[in-house]
Image: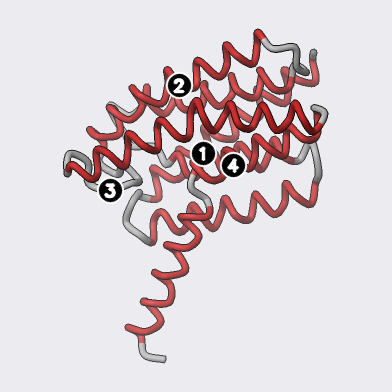
Amino acid sequence: MSAMEVNKVQMNFARCISVIGHPFLLMPLFTAIVAYNVLPPRQAMIAEIIAVAVVIIPAGAYTIFRVHRGTWGNLDVSDQRERSQFYGILLPLLLIIVIIAWIAEVPTSIPLGALAILALVGAAFFVNRWIKVSLHTGFGVFAALAMFLIDQRAGTLVLILALLVAWSRVALGRHTAREVLLGGTLGCLVAAAFITTLRYL
């Protein structure tokens, strides 16, 4: 294979990994795994439907609408100014999920997990004025470390995916290595706080 062909294969692989590790796909999957491990099947299904209906569908539809109108560049919301607007939509939706989770009679791990995700996105929003954090990497690392509480093999697989996602974001030019590293660091810190609080309670 020529260098050009190798580069094309790498870029295609990077795009595939980036899509698989997109928070809008990884978050519902993570939510479903957690819900089905701590709730009866019927309640777990309801929790998953609520999470998708309240966060994923509205935020995803809004993103698609903005990209379709040409006011945002792409579905990854790669522009730093556009991302600030995206956070303005995502944070209130996540706050609604946190409130629903606290009101509902569910194990503490669920509202704490929702609060952790809100904290991760909130931290990314706060630092966005200086640097555009890789949410792909941040959420991937958070999900991987939290997953270790459920199953070590699953946690290992998600961690490998998170590392591949971090590489893909740089390879695709969506983020710099510094932005990916910061995303991973935020994911680690939020996961550590979540796990420590959960064990303390």
Mark-to-mark CA distance, 1 and 3 = 19 Å
**What is the CA distance from the residue labelled 4 to the residue labelled 2?**
22 Å
Which residue in the rendered view is the most extreme toward the bottom?
1
Which is more N-terminal, label 1 or label 2?
2
Determine whether the residue tagged by mark 2 lies in a helix, strand or loop: helix
Q: Closer to the observer: label 4 or label 2?
A: 2
| Lower sequence index among marks 4 and 2 | 2
Quadrant of the rendered image containing residue 198: top right
Residue topped by disc 3: 74
Residue 187 image-quadrant placement: top right
The reply to whether the C-beta atoms of the residues labelled 4 and 1 are less than 8 Å apart is yes
> What residue is disc 4 on?
141
- First-in-chain label (3 vs 4): 3
Q: Which mark is residue 47?
A: none
Q: Is residue 133 above or below residue 95?
A: below
- Residue at figure coordinates x 69%, y 12% from the top left: 104
Check residue 93 in the rendering and tell me which mark sits there, or answer none. 2
Q: Do the numbered discs 4 and 2 sit on residues whose CB atoms are within 8 Å?
A: no
Secondary element type, mark 1: helix
Q: Is residue 97 left or right of residue 32?
A: left
- Crowding at label 4, few (<14), some or many (≥20) Cα neighbours within 10 Å? many
- Mark 1 packing: few (<14 Cα in 10 Å), some, or many (20+)? many
Q: In which quarter of the view is residue 200 placed? A: top right
In which quadrant of the rendered image does the C terminus lie?
top right
